[in-house]
Image (cartoon, rainbow, N blue to C red):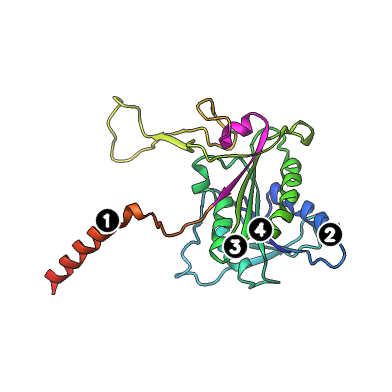
Amino acid sequence: MRILITNDDGILAPGIAVLARHVARWIEEGPAGEVREAIIVAPHTNHSGMSSAVGDVFDHPSVHYRRHTIVGAESIPTYGLEAPPALCAIIGATGGLDFQPDLILSGINAGANVGRSVLHSGTVGAILTGAQLGLSGLAVSVQWGADVHYDTAAAVAVEVLDELLSAPSRTLLNLNVPNLPASELKGVRRGRISTAGIVKTAGPKAGGEPLGEEGELPLRLGAATPELGDVSDEDADEDGALLAAGYASLTPLKGPHEDSDTALDSLMHSALGKIARHLELLR
């Protein structure tokens, strides 16, 4: 197995360093004759919340890189790119550096990626991008708090690698781990994506002063924040609720694909017909 490691917190973030050290040990402990390699291609600075954005590659068709060394994972080639996570995933996945990987391992993100935050997360965006190129992926996040236990999340993540190796290509998993020592982790459960969002509302309260020509719009944050907010309205098997209860949550994801629901056939037929008639009038 050849692994591409990336993240959205940046090449110098503690989460990716812990993950790299665990992967380095996993490589060293591999059975004789089994190919185990890894490469790190990550943003040079924090790109949180970038989802699957690649930036303006048309005006800037090159990417600056710098080699790095992660203590405890010196054997893994490491590159910091002036690029968001998705572009790092593309560059690493297409074999433009040392080798072409089989799997993208993204994280460890400093903060939970649960609920609707999976849509906006650069950590998740990297594996969604890799899936478009045929790669499987695992996004790893840990709930934020005092003395973040990255080691717990890394240990759980490494246990999933062998499963992903034998899974069909484009298999995507989102792993969220509570901020607990390994000894206090209650277990791992399959989590459903909740409806929790990052931002509940924005702007002044109803009935307040009218907006001026310029100003600040305050954001009121929801439960899907790095620390994990109030999840009392979630079902017990939803991702945020599982974290709050002390369980790691593992969720299969699916990237963008055509909606083939036959219930949309009549809508598509009608829309295509109207467009065709409009084009006829323009001729």
Residue 96: within the magenta?
A: no
Real-space CA distance between mark 1 and mark 3, rounded to the nearest whole angstrom: 38 Å
Residue 238: within the magenta?
A: yes
Real-space CA distance between mark 2 and mark 3, rounded to the nearest whole angstrom: 25 Å
Q: Nearer the viewer, mark 2 or mark 1?
A: 1
Q: Residue furthest front?
A: 262
- Kind of residue at badge 4: Ala
In the depicted structure, whether residue 169 falls above or below residue 215: below
Mark nearer the N terminus (2 vs 3)? 2
Real-space CA distance between mark 3 and mark 4, rounded to the nearest whole angstrom: 20 Å
Real-space CA distance between mark 4 and mark 2, rounded to the nearest whole angstrom: 19 Å
The residues colored magenta run 237-253
- Kind of residue at badge 1: Ser
Q: Residue at x 70, y 51 (%)?
A: 16
Residue picked out by circle 4: 167
- Kind of residue at badge 2: Gly
Residue picked out by circle 3: 89
Residue picked out by circle 1: 266
- Kind of residue at badge 3: Ala
Residue picked out by circle 2: 30
